Amino acid sequence: MFEPAPTPVAAAPQGLAVRLGRVLLAPWSRLALLVVLLAAAGTSVLVLEPQRLLADGWPVQLNGAAAVVVFAVAYGLCTAAFVPRPLLNLAAGALFGTQLGLVGALGGTVIGAGIAFGLGRALGQDALRPLLRGRVLHTVDGQLSRHGFRSVLAARLFPGVPFWVSNYCSSVSRTGWLPFLLATGLGSIPNTAAYVVAGSRASTPTSPTFLIAMGFIALTGLAAAIVAWCKRHKLRGDDGTGGQPEAGNRPEADDRPGTRV
């Protein structure tokens, strides 16, 4: 005997579920979810005010290695929610001292970078990559895609671009996970250490250690400004090619099949 064919009434809900799933998984739907998550994270930071740790101190129930681990996780979540890293680095030094503070701050830096990179890669890349047609955007994307480790390392060593901006820009590019996280960890050591030392010696602002740390911070900021000034022509496309990208670097070449990393 032949089984009866499914009725249209039974097939309709299944077809509706499939269409709804496609809409929810579409690039622009995921991008909208990313925007909502980031807006919620920024709002929570304004409400919870994590910077109060500088004034109120760390909870007495947490101490030792456990406190450093909890701080690193909280640090990562805060950086993904747009809290400035210098403030968190100062807090790390003030709460834990130089050595443990540096461990917690670097761990939190890598965690926060990984969170932002993962969110941007999963929710924003497919929708935003087709929009990378401007000259400056294409140049930045090309540098990150072709020289991910070197570009991210330079951005961490010479801080000028906000931490969260570089994270999400890297996630939209074709930079791999390992080069991104490794360059973030290595490149963040000098500047993070300077802020942690400054935070640990904030009670003695006239001490040589504090002054050296602040001097290093100022020098890295000046170096970042000089590098940005020297690179301005390249970002504008004034590289002697008449403002036209090379054949192998055109935006269309990045989205051809087989070029995704």
Image (tube, grey):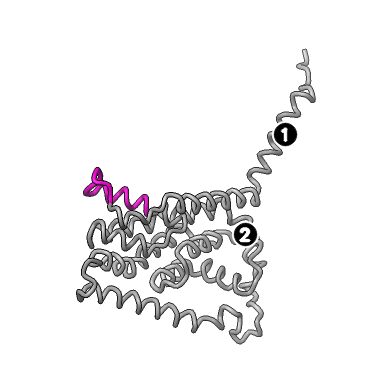
Residue 166 place in picture, x, y as percent: 49, 65
**Residues in magenta, as a range:** 58-75
Q: Quadrant of the N terminus?
A: top right
What residue do we see at 63% from left, 74% from top?
135
Residue 60 magenta: yes
Indicate the quadrant where residue 256 lies: bottom right
- What type is the residue that disc 2 sits on? Leu
Residue 16 — which label? 1
What residue do we see at 33% from left, 62% from top?
89
Depth check, front residue: 190 or 61: 61
Q: Which numbered disc, 1 or 2, marks the residue that appears first in the sequence?
A: 1
Left or right of 188 on screen, residue 18: right
Q: Quadrant of the C terminus?
A: bottom right
Packing grade of label 1 (10 A; few <14, some 14-19, many >=20) is few
Which residue is the extreme one toward the front?
Answer: 55
Left or right of 2 on screen, residue 158: left
Q: Secondary structure at mark 2?
A: helix
Which residue is the extreme one toward the bottom?
Answer: 240
Depth check, front residue: 16 or 41: 41
- What type is the residue that disc 1 sits on? Leu
Q: Secondary structure at mark 1?
A: helix
| Vertical order, 158 against 176 (above or below) | below
Depth check, front residue: 121 or 168: 168
Residue 219 place in picture, x, y as percent: 35, 79
What residue do we see at 35% from left, 77% from top?
218
Residue 37 place in picture, x, y as percent: 54, 49
What residue do we see at 60% from left, 84% from top?
238
- Residue matched to label 2: 128
| Vertical order, 242 against 171 (above or below) | below
Residue 25 magenta: no
Residue 199 — which label? none
Depth check, front residue: 203 or 167: 203
